[in-house]
Amino acid sequence: NLLALMAILAAAIFYAFSGVYCRRFKVMDVSPMATATGMMIASSVMLIPVVLLVDQPWSLPMPSVASLGALVGLALLSTSLAYIIYFRILETAGATNLLLVTFLLPVSAILLGIGFLNEVLLPKHLVGMALIGMGLAAIDGRIWAKLKSQT
């Protein structure tokens, strides 16, 4: 599906842009907590009209207590805490090092799928993981520096 592929490509591009763009918060001496809080509030406010138009929450049944608890858990742990950590790492390690972690997302998704969803590990997954590993090694530069010093 072309639209899905374009969405994946756009997500990757904007994720890369975000790391570079958010570096300016360090220059402005804005704390990672304030940056994460501002981003979460702004994105929530921007999504309210979309939710009202698309989902029409008034027409849906009231979710169960367990569902609301899961929603709060996702909001606090998987989203808010993740962004606080994201901006803290950005502040201390820089955008380049922070964005290297994104290479590991497909690997962890495959491993979690195998571990929790009983998905099958295919040869193409192993090839992809090997390419990701080689890419990380090439970007890191320590291997090249070690090889260069031996010659």
Image: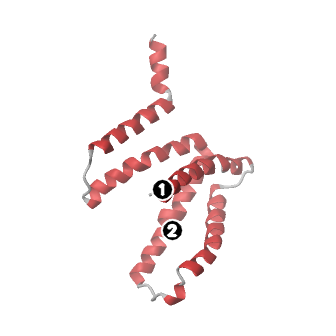
Label drawn at residue 2: 1
Q: Residue at x 39, y 36 (%)?
A: 131
Q: Amino acid at mark 2?
A: Leu
Q: Nearer the viewer, residue 34 or 98?
A: 98
Whole-percent x and y of residue 64? 41, 85
Distance, label 2 to label 1, CA atoms, is 33 Å
Closer to the observer: label 2 or label 1?
1
The quarter of the image holding the N terminus is bottom left
Q: Residue furthest right?
A: 28
Within 10 Å of disc 1 (Cα), the crowding (few <14, some 14-19, many 20+) is few
Pinpoint residue 115: horizontal percent, then vertical percent: 27, 55
Residue 88 visible (yes or no): no
Where does label 2 land, which residue? Answer: 76
The residue at 33%/55% (across/down) is 112
Could you classify mark 2 by the number of other residues whose Cα lies within 10 Å: few (under 14), some (14-19), or many (20 or more)? few
Q: Amino acid at mark 1?
A: Leu
Residue 8 seen in the figure: yes
Residue 113, above or below 99:
below
Q: Quadrant of residue 125?
A: top left
Q: Residue at x 48, y 56 (%)?
A: 2
